[in-house]
Image (tube, rainbow, N blue to C red):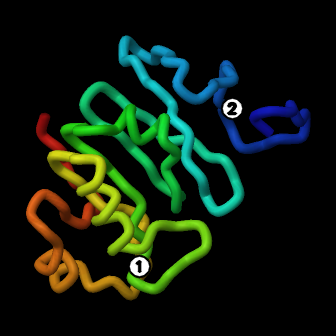
Amino acid sequence: YIFEPNPNYEGGLIAKLDLTEIEPYIPFEVAGITITPFALSHGSQPVMGYKFGDIAYATDCNFIPGESEELLRNIPVLILDGLRYKAHKTHFTIDQAVAKAQELGAQQTYLIHMTHDIDYHSVNNALPAGIELAYDGLQIKL
């Protein structure tokens, strides 16, 4: 109903969107904020993460290509996919995410996209310094 008008739609107001195609590594601006998309892989599917100044957001991924790694090197805040401990074809495991964050030299990493079987307190307490599980409502101070 948003992309193809439907005269029978009865749901109330319809959002108006201006769609813009984006490409990896070509910055764009929204509301005065510069956003740089970067390439990731979700298994065999190409996906993108986003860098907003000193923060990078990379979810639904299990691989970060070299050019993206260079963009993320020593990032102050990395928000990174860490699904579970068991291997998965399209997501970093928690151990892989920890290793990648350390390899990139991220100052602070928040793991996201965890499954329901991850016990927040026990896993969080076992993570190395500078890496923690994110949670709903988390506020990050810069």
State which tag comes first along the sequence, 2 or 1: 2
Taking the spot 22% from the left edge, 47% from the top edge, the residue there is 105
Badge 1 marks a residue whose secondary structure is loop
Image quadrant where one finds the N terminus: top right
Taking the spot 69% from the left edge, 32% from the top edge, the residue there is 14
Q: How many callouts does the rendering have?
A: 2
Amino acid type, mark 2: Ile
- Residue 116 quadrant: bottom left
User: Residue 10, which numbered label?
Assistant: none
Classify 47 as above or below 136: above
Classify 73 as above or below 41: above
> Quick one: label 2, few (<14), some, or many (20+) residues within 10 Å?
few
Taking the spot 43% from the left edge, 78% from the top edge, the residue there is 115
Mark 1 sits on what residue? 84
Q: Which residue is the extreme one toward the right?
A: 7
User: Residue 14, which numbered label?
Assistant: 2
